[in-house]
């Protein structure tokens, strides 16, 4: 069965500093990979997704993520964090066969210091 | 944009009550999902549906049932609410195989069972 691990439960970063959130997945074939963000009291919003091709994908709000097959990782990065980036971030993996669903990691909560 | 609407943002129910959580999407998506979100556990799939009148159990279906009589509406039912069902409930929908398309989420319903 597929699984997703986000090793960091909480991360605190200063405004203007860079951010990297880790995501490791377990899946036999090439997965579909996603990052979602959840602001307080809100649902989840899609930041970016990877299907195939270029392993560095760009998303909304200045985020990017890199797929590394050899490390089974899909880490999320942002060069300069804004206070509005304080939120919870979820990595998810989906399979290719019809009718399959997404599996989510436990989430990483990001706090931004002024 | 696809919109997924959950009828209530906050609900407080008593132990033993039958509880209905409603979700409506407006873009003719085939797939709909119910997750619950708890701190440190991420999102866990309760039930999902790939078509009208069709449902499949997710990872934690015990104590829940669902109904999908129309394509746009997917209801989650707590047959006899218990305090351990206090949680944030998220509805999502997707077009076709959610692998490449990802989900669109509603804003969530925070349910408290007292």
Image (spheres, coloured by chain):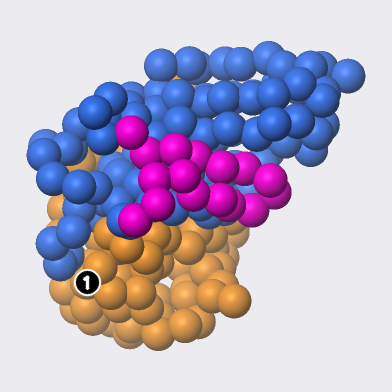
Q: Can I make out residue A81 in this image?
A: yes
Residue at image coords 39%, 60%: B102
For residue B38, side relative to residue A4 (left or right):
right
Residue at image coords 68%, 14%: A12
Q: Can I make out residue B21 in this image?
A: no
Q: Position of residue B14 (x, y in %)?
A: 47, 40
Q: Nearer the viewer, residue A95 or A20?
A: A20
Range covered by the magenta-colored residues:
A53-68
Residue that mark 1 sits on: B50
Q: Is residue B75 above or below residue A88?
A: below
Q: Position of residue A107 (x, y in %)?
A: 47, 29
For residue A17, side relative to residue A91 (left or right):
right
Residue at image coords 34%, 56%: A53
Q: Nearer the viewer, residue A49 or A37?
A: A49
The verdict on residue A57 being magenta is yes
**What color is chain A drawn in?**
blue
**What color is chain B drawn in?**
orange
């Amino acid at each position: 069965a597929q699984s997703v691990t986000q090793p960091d439960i909480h991360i605190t970063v200063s405004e203007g500093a860079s951010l990297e959130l880790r995501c490791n997945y377990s899946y036999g074939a090439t997965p579909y990979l996603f990052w979602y963000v959840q602001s307080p009291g809100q649902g989840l919003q899609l930041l970016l997704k990877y299907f195939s091709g270029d392993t560095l994908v760009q998303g909304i709000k200045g985020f990017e993520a890199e797929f590394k097959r050899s490390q089974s990782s899909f880490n999320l990065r942002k060069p300069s964090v804004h206070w509005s980036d304080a939120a919870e971030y979820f990595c998810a993996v989906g399979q290719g066969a019809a009718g399959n669903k997404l599996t989510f990691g436990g989430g990483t909560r990001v706090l931004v210091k002024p | 944009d696809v919109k997924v609407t959950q009828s209530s943002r906050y609900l407080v129910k008593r132990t033993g009550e039958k509880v209905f959580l409603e979700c409506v999407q407006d873009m003719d998506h085939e797939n709909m999902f119910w997750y619950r979100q708890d701190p440190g556990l991420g999102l866990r799939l309760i039930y999902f549906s790939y078509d009208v009148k069709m449902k499949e159990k997710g990872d934690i279906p015990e104590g829940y049932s669902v109904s999908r009589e129309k394509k746009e509406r997917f209801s989650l039912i707590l047959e006899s609410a218990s305090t351990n069902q206090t949680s944030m409930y998220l509805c999502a929908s997707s077009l076709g195989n959610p692998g490449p398309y990802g989900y669109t989420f509603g804003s969530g319903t925070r349910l408290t069972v007292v």
